[in-house]
Image (cartoon, grey):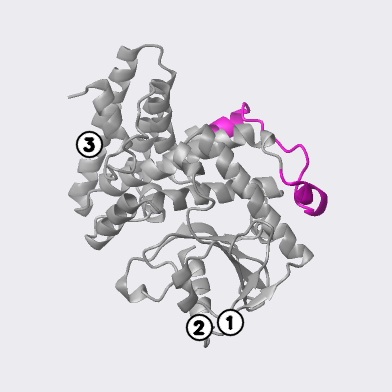
Amino acid sequence: MKSVIQFFVLIFLLLNSICTEAQILQPTSEEKIIIERFEYIRQIKKYVGNLFWKNFSNNEFPGTVVYFTDSASYFINPLPEMKDKVSKYAIVENDYDWNIWKLRMPLDSAKFVMETQFQFDPKAKAYINYRTPVLFCSSPELTRKEKVVINTTQEWAIALMHELYHQYQYSNEAILTYVLRLYQEKKMIDMDSLQTIYLSNQAFRDTLKLENEILKKAVAATSFDEEKKLFTQFLKMRTKRGVDFFKKKKFYISTPENFWEKLEGTSLMMEHELKQHISEIKPTPYLLENDPMCENNFKFDESSATEIDFYTELNDERFYVGATGFNMVRLLEKNKVPYKDNFFSYASLPLELQLKYFYKIK
């Protein structure tokens, strides 16, 4: 995934030319659909922000979104300083007073991508995502070619909202500063690397499965004492796994694990809440009439075992920090722990430590 994103970033740099006054374009019918899709995203963001995390609904978009079709890219809400880092662009007029740039792309360059990413290496200062999170996303049409589970604009919107929520998290100065410092101190690895460790180490994987089962039992527990006992067991098992890993690799796995559980667990909870209410957020009339991938009366069956397991169960095809993080968020939500109050101000504070404080475990 990273190589794909870096490829796109390089394209923007290589095509850089002497800046002239940008041409202003009236949107084509296809571009009108793109504009209306992002109005739908804005409406979803406001709805789910009010539902799950109030501050998330405050701004139109938390950062720049780069949207790829098979022949062009569109910058939604681009930062002004990006003007010096991209190729010649045109401005697409729209009814919502957003700033939208259109850049040409080589016809064979569009590949599937749906990720928020930033660069932290000083050698990447010329990149558009240097020290700032940029959301790169393929159009629903391109996404459908690569992801058979995404067949509608609504399903694409949910996937994009997950990454938009990560962009919101990274856009917080405390979170971004913390993760950049960890990378610079070589104390951080990405979720892909964590997942490789999980998949290649049988003992590590087996212990994590037990940890996740304990978390699920704690969520289902009917008494505080039972919950506390289970979570104490979880912490002991997790600590031993971390110590064993350090003895072999001389690396504290708990540092990146705690960080990604915090970000991925809350993003998945937002996504889970969104799926429960997606049918209440209507696409714009223009989308319903003109977008061939927009499905009228779309809804998810969140009560199905498949949907429940998607978030709570470990699956080798998904990041393990998502399941463990999500289940810890479930515990925090169950007990009405005000973890959101200091989520950003204490960027290094893990979910597990908040629960440890709540249960008063010594």
Residues 286 and 22: in front is 22
Q: State left or right for residue 233 relative to residue 13.
A: left
Identify the amino acid type marked 2.
Leu
Q: Mark 1 points at which residue?
A: 21
Q: Which amino acid does label 3 sit on?
A: Lys
Q: Residue at x 41, y 12 (%)?
A: 222
Q: Is label 1 in contact with label 2 (beta carbons under 8 Å)?
A: no
Identify the residue position indicated by label 2 in the image: 14
How many C-alpha atoms fall within 10 Å of the one at disc 2: few (<14), some, or many (≥20)? few
Q: Tell me what residue is drawn at x 55 percent, y 33 percent.
A: 273
Rendering coords of residue 356 (x, y %): 26, 27
**Image vertical order of residue 71 relative to residue 47, above or below:** below
Please tell me which residue is depicted at 79% across the width and 53% down the height of the picture.
292
- Residue behind mark 3: 240
Q: Distance between the residues labelled 1 and 2?
A: 19 Å
> Can you say whether 49 is above or below 109 in the image?
above
